[in-house]
Amino acid sequence: MAPPLRRAPTMDDVAAAAGVSKMTVSRALRGAVVAAPTRARIMEAVSRLGYVPHAAAGALASRRSGFVAAIVPSMDNSNFAETVAGLEAALRQAGLDLLLGTTLYSSAREEELLQTLMRHRPEGIVLTGGAHSRRVAALLSRSALPVVETWDLPASPIGGVVGFSNRAAGAVMTAHLAAIGRRRIAFLGGASRRDPRGEERGRGYEETLAASGLGPPLVFRHGQPPLSMRHGAEGMARLLERWPETDAVVCASDLIAFGAIGECQRRGIAVPERIAIGGFGDFEVSRCAVPAISTVAVDARGIGERAGAMLARAVAASRRGEILSPERIEVGLRLVARGSSLHPAHLEHHPIRWNHLIG
Amino acid sequence: MAPPLRRAPTMDDVAAAAGVSKMTVSRALRGAVVAAPTRARIMEAVSRLGYVPHAAAGALASRRSGFVAAIVPSMDNSNFAETVAGLEAALRQAGLDLLLGTTLYSSAREEELLQTLMRHRPEGIVLTGGAHSRRVAALLSRSALPVVETWDLPASPIGGVVGFSNRAAGAVMTAHLAAIGRRRIAFLGGASRRDPRGEERGRGYEETLAASGLGPPLVFRHGQPPLSMRHGAEGMARLLERWPETDAVVCASDLIAFGAIGECQRRGIAVPERIAIGGFGDFEVSRCAVPAISTVAVDARGIGERAGAMLARAVAASRRGEILSPERIEVGLRLVARGSSLHPAHLEHHPIRWNHLIG
DNA sequence: CCGGCGCATGTTAGCGGTAACAATTTCATG
DNA sequence: CATGAAATTGTTACCGCTAACATGCGCCGG
């Protein structure tokens, strides 16, 4: 019996223990053709030695990292966490590892991050949103990597797309509030240009307002992304001072809507009687809040799962030397009317339309 | 001028372009001593060719992956997201890349995940919680990797620790509710053994109840982790049916507390007048809800930052061939009394004690 | 009984970097 | 101007694995 090794066992050690060549071990571990008894001996040696393959060595030799990189704006307090969970699940199933980075809504950081991630030679990339700096776009197109963009429907996508129209999301909620009779509908969003998806939802609001003959737009911007409940509360307070006659608010996200409702409650403003409020994203808090928050629901986890599956297909094709033509999946939006925009009595007549699919 | 390369440029290409040897390029890129003019030529060549170092090759040659692996239960709707953000920031500063995995509270998945992550030869590991299967502990101790455990204070830690006593957290909230005169204090948590930290908080509740002469414990368990608001609402509904005389509830997390408060509101039960409710974690929702939720605050992001810094130190030492003696950082807990346990009038006399640090 | 085809396994040559040591140049000093 | 030390750069040998090709062996039909 050989003495236990000080260093971590390598494939050579396994090969020696099983009485075969290194190459046969490599084949056995990756599922290639190996005679059953040989494979059994190898597997026994692997578990006896506690062998763990060295991913970097494999990546170097095979020119396949097994990594997929994903770049999201943020992971806290947002639906992106669910998208990442979906991604992780889909990629794991395809045998790919997820390398994650957060930009905190800074495009400088996005560039830097991409550079860092590229060192690991990912075989594919998931991006959030369709707006990227020129340099990012250049880096990606030069790398010829499979790319999937999510949470948006870019006009000229770099690769595949799994997203929805943020403009439509803003439009749908605005239309809903107009349909229930509101006339002074405001929009509450972030102050900066750093969140293109939030901007788009605001644009959908403005268009719908104009189309409904309900002008002028009352757009109030407050706070830097990542926007959270606090920004909703603060923003609502200021919005009320500026436009006290407001009777409905379209919020850029459910978190903002929640903060806004809280502010109304503290001020004794009845929601939805005096002011109706709608959000975006169908966060869990919207289902559980009292009143429950009307929202435009989007399947965040599903976006991740589909993007992961799409990218896994593209990576598999790329390994075969093929290039798939980019797919484009538009996921549905669903208006979910709840207590923050409809009276309980009203709700009975307008039951929550979970299946009302939009655009 | 050489023709543009089809393949990605390597260090050899840069060396040729700059008229030096590969080794000099390697040194220049890693900040070793290189004459200023030479370094300038190399950097110029790097950016002209768009060279990106190949991490796997470097890892293989140097036996340093530059990775740190972190294993967390979940990323959605929990404070772990903030811990991960803190970790990421601290590690990035130390030039380490974060490799992330989620267990979804399954220890089988934790094992499998660890195995997968080990293929990348991380130089250190961050674990959540101090309870691990025998196999996980064995795998880690055999690997001799620097380890930091977080969100708990294990009795016999594997390596470093950045955590707090979950038992104390449960105790503190229970004591608070007892101190404001509540006598029938219940505990609302998860149904399974999969969340050891939630269990511990329940234990702190029971001990404090016994110590205060307020028996018997009213422990209601509902739902599998990851526990969310919905579980709080459902659990509260059943708890009220079983123990209608309850006048206070210690919840295993703020999310559960939020759901529970919502259920009370829907039933017309006044919070805090009829039932006082407390949570754990100081999630943002607790600050913004109406009433605001009393909670035991813990600095989730700070835990991540400290754990990252601690691990970075251990990795640096390990690279020098040293082994640091394990550190143990106990982060403070802070009782934050808010409207879900105190009347507004009462709150004036008991101002929110942000700085009240607990053991 | 033999050539040849397939299956199972082995051999060779890197993948793209870095450690360790060797070689060369530079420069201050006696 | 000789000389040794310091500063700078180059050379060699891998790191642990896999692609591509080579080899050996059993079994088939003719």
Image (cartoon, coloured by chain):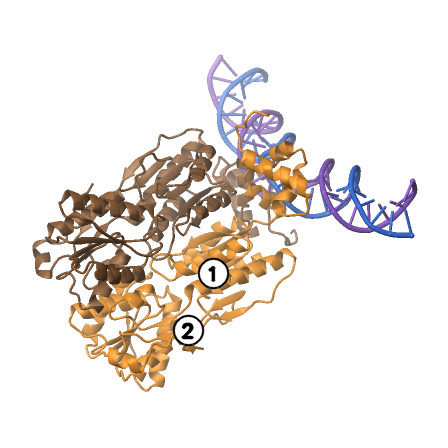
Chain colours: A brown, B orange, C blue, D purple
Residue A319 image position (x, y, % from top left): 45, 33
| Left or right of A304, for residue A5 | right
Mark positioned earlier in the residue sequence (2 or 1): 1
Q: Is residue B156 visible?
A: no
Q: Nearer the viewer, mark 2 or mark 1?
A: 2
Q: From mark 2 to mark 1, how far is it between C-alphas?
A: 20 Å
Q: Is residue D23 above or below residue A66?
A: above
Which mark identifies residue B127? Answer: 1
Residue B335 image position (x, y, % from top left): 37, 75
- Specify the amino acid type for callout 2: Leu
Q: Is residue A84 visible?
A: yes
Q: Secondary structure at mark 2?
A: strand
* Chain of the residue that carries numbered disc 2 in the rendered image: B
- Specify the amino acid type for callout 1: Leu
The residue shown at (15%, 65%) is A270
Which mark identifies residue B333? Answer: 2
